[in-house]
Every structure is written in structure tokens, then in C-alpha cells.
Image (cartoon, rainbow, N blue to C red):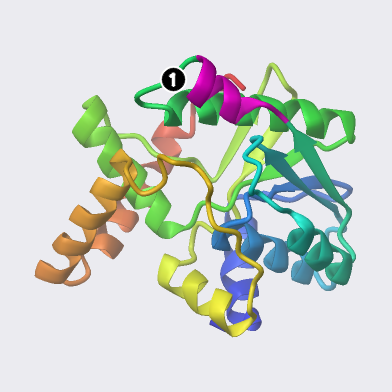
Amino acid sequence: MKLQRLLSYTRQAIDTYEMIEEGDKIAVGISGGKDSLTLLYALQGLQHFYPKKFELVAITVDLGFPEFDTSKIAKLCEELNVPYEVVSTEIAKIVFQERKEKHPCSLCAKMRKGALNQAVKKLGVNKIAYAHHKDDIVETMLMSLIFEGRFHTFSPKTYLEDMDLTVIRPMMYVLEADVIGFMHKYELPVLKNPCPADGYTKREYVKERLRQLNREHPGCKERMFTAIERTLPDYQSDKVSKA
């Protein structure tokens, strides 16, 4: 996928759900993975021509794994002229050594999100951009159905009342396959996930089931996404969530 196509998909989502307003200061949460680095490229590219002017800052929450090196991300942000902040934490130590969590993902995500939200408030940020793409949205819906018994997934835009922050998801129309293509074409400095639980999650299970369904019933993933979009006015009505 070329940058022009990425910018087109991203702008479509931003315009459809009014994600960006004049004067916004937006933080991009950078995990070091392909998705967040692609989102950084997209928003930095949009800055040059989007009619509503906004600021960008990139932020990484360092979980405390010793092998996690953010120097390549810092170099990319310097090349893109985007300010970059690293938030140091001991989340890995707490989750894996002190609490020895058998199912660490939920606690880790909650602590990581809390650290990110506190950091962006100090920087004067009013919006956080997450790099969830179209596949993430469909997978989350299936996870919710299978494991929680409800129809729920990520909203395009969510206001966090207690933090006075808005979460936006500008890559909701971008397929994961296109992100992978973009990663290779532009040689993104993707970091290997050091988490020992990586690849052994409910999401990976659902991802594989979705691949199988789409092979057996071509186009079913796209139809699922269409069904989700049709329900957005219903479950977006509850826009207030806890940080």
C-alpha cells in the first residue's frame, strides 16, 4: 500500500466520524508495532494538507522489558519532525514477576492505558489516536460475542469523561494486509514484541477463526464490518467510558 492510499482511507474515517477539530493536539500511542508506526505516518502526512490544523506528538509506554529499545522509533520521529516521548514504567515487573499473572493481557492493557493517559495530560494533549484497523474491529466484535455474550467493538471516537480526553481510531477503514504492505514498502522500524504472552491470546485464536471463515465464505469479513458500521449509532450513543 502506498502512502497516498493510506492517507485516503485515514481521511475518510476522520471526516466520517469528525475525529479532528481545529487546534487539536493529538498523541499517537506508539507500541513499536506495524500498526502504530503506520498511523504515525498517516497523521503526519495529513498534517500537510488537512483543512483543520492540528499538532502531533508520539508517545511510547515502555513496559520495562530490558530488550525493548526505542532508539529506531526516536530516529523515525525525528525524520518526520514529530516530538517523541517515552514513558518509563515497571508494568512488566508487576505483571509477570510480582503478580505472576496467568492471563496478563487485561491487567497489562489497563496499566498501560493509565500510564499513557496520565502522560498525555501533562503534555496538553486533548486526543489520543489508537492504531486499531478494520481487522481489529471485526476481531474484537467476534471476541465479544464468543467470550462475553454481547455485540461490542471499538468505537471510532470515544470521549473519556474522567480524563477529559477523546480517543480516535483513524485507521478503522485500513485492512491489516494493507498495513503489512505499507510496512514492507516503507521499511518501518518495527520492534519485536518482548512480551512472553505475545501470540498466545484470545485475539490470536479469533484471528485464525476469522481467516478460516473468510476462506470458506469469501467476503464475510467485509460483511461483518458493514454490519458493525450499521450499528454504530446504537452503541456509540454511550460515549462515556472510564480511563
- Expressed as whole percent of the image width and height from the top left, the position of residue 202 reads 29, 39
Determine whether the residue tagged by mark 1 lies in a helix, strand or loop.
loop
In the displayed structure, does residue 93 sit left or right of residue 180? right
Q: Which residue is mark 1?
A: 100
Structural crowding at the residue carrying mark 1, measured as other residues with C-alpha within 10 Å and reported as few (<14), some (14–19) or many (≥20): few
Bounds of the magenta span?
A: 89-98
Work out which quarter of the rendered image holds the C terminus and state it. Answer: top right
Residue 219 higher or lower than 29, as above or below: below
- Observer-nearest of 35 and 226: 35
- Expressed as whole percent of the image width and height from the top left, the position of residue 164 reads 75, 24
Q: How many marks?
A: 1
Residue 172 higher or lower than 147, as above or below: below
Q: For residue 164: magenta?
A: no
Residue at horizontal 59%, vertical 25%? 93
Residue 148 higher or lower than 211, as above or below: above
- Observer-nearest of 234 and 128: 128
Residue at horizontal 41%, vertical 32%? 235
Visible in this render: residue 139?
yes
